[in-house]
Amino acid sequence: MMKSSLVLTFIAAAVSLSFTDPNKVAVDQKVQQVFEATRQIESLKYDFVRTERINGKFESNESSVKMTRRPYQVYMKLQEPQAGIEVLYPHPTDEKRALVNPNGFPWVNLKLDPKGDLMRKGQHHTILDCGYDHVVSVMEYLFYKHKNEINQILNEHGTARVNGRNCEVISMVNSDFGYLNHEVKKGESIASIALKNRLNEYLIYEKNNQLGLFAGVKEGDIIKVPTDYAAKMYLYIDIEKQIPLKLEIYDELGLFEKYEFKNVEINPELSAEEFSHGNTAYQF
């Protein structure tokens, strides 16, 4: 009887192996391939569609972006709804500021702090988060933070078309997502807490609205912070280029932010003129 049982077990294992696709890549390996692909990017051109929940309502805009990673340089032009606004980072005379052409009142170029209220008004992130580095750093942090249960967190959802490209759809779901009380330590800010723990800075402000948007905190303050960047993330990964073309981020209330990368060009040759306020194609 024992011999018969062992034979049946062996046969079952052999049948299972015979139907296993040797070319099939595990979902965690697919995500790691995205990490590796984005590490090879030195420059980008793309159109960017941003949709974010602001005070309970969704706000969207579309812009065209050119950027290099080393040095970090960005030229952005808004396409809609406020077409013509241009942003150049860094400012030609101040590497900590951005040059902004508001294409309207006050009809002069502005030198603004990328992390300041004016540039952050009505949006979750700053111009310092362009490209893939920010989102991939969040994904990598979550990937290794939850490495022991990564197979339970990652899920495959087949394929989908995103702006004419074939994409694999993968979700990262954290069923334990919630909020904890955090006592602010000396020298901490909302931004530093978010960066250290790879959390969504805007979400922290939203959950602590008594502070006021982008307000400061002081040592000893008790604030609510999320346990992770999001309760759920959907990644639409370009099958050929192995880069995210769409990301959907959810908190406990539902969709919090969505981003689409269209017409992506990886490592195009971008001259210094592309990031000069004197470029005749720009309106600075």
Image (cartoon, rainbow, N blue to C red):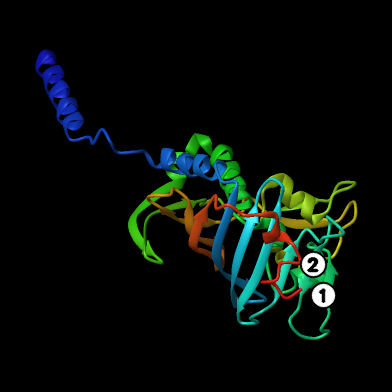
Judged left or right of residue 158, residue 225 is right
Local crowd size for mark 2, using a 10 Å CA cut-off: few (<14), some (14–19), many (≥20): many
The answer to whether marks 2 and 1 mark residues whose Cβ atoms lie closer than 8 Å is: yes
- At 50% from the left and 43% from the top, the residue drawn is 37
- At 12% from the left and 23% from the top, the residue drawn is 8
Residue farthest to the top, as pictured: 3
**Camera-nearest residue between 146 and 28:** 28
Q: Is residue 29 above or below residue 180?
A: above
**Camera-nearest residue between 140 and 264:** 264
**Camera-nearest residue between 250 and 240:** 240
Give the residue at mark 2. Answer: 99
**Kind of residue at badge 1:** Asn
Residue 39: x and y in percent read 56, 41
**SS for callout 1:** loop
Q: Which labelled disc corresponds to residue 139?
A: none
Asked whether residue 212 is in view, the answer is no
**Kind of residue at badge 2:** Leu
Residue 206: x and y in percent read 71, 67
- Whole-angstrom CA distance, mark 2 to mark 1, is 7 Å
Give the residue at mark 1. Answer: 109
**SS for callout 2:** strand
Give the position of the C terminus as an image quadrant.
Answer: bottom right
- At 44% from the left and 46% from the top, the residue drawn is 154
Of label 2 and label 1, which has the lower sequence position?
2
- At 11% from the left and 13% from the top, the residue drawn is 3
Give the position of the N terminus as an image quadrant.
Answer: top left
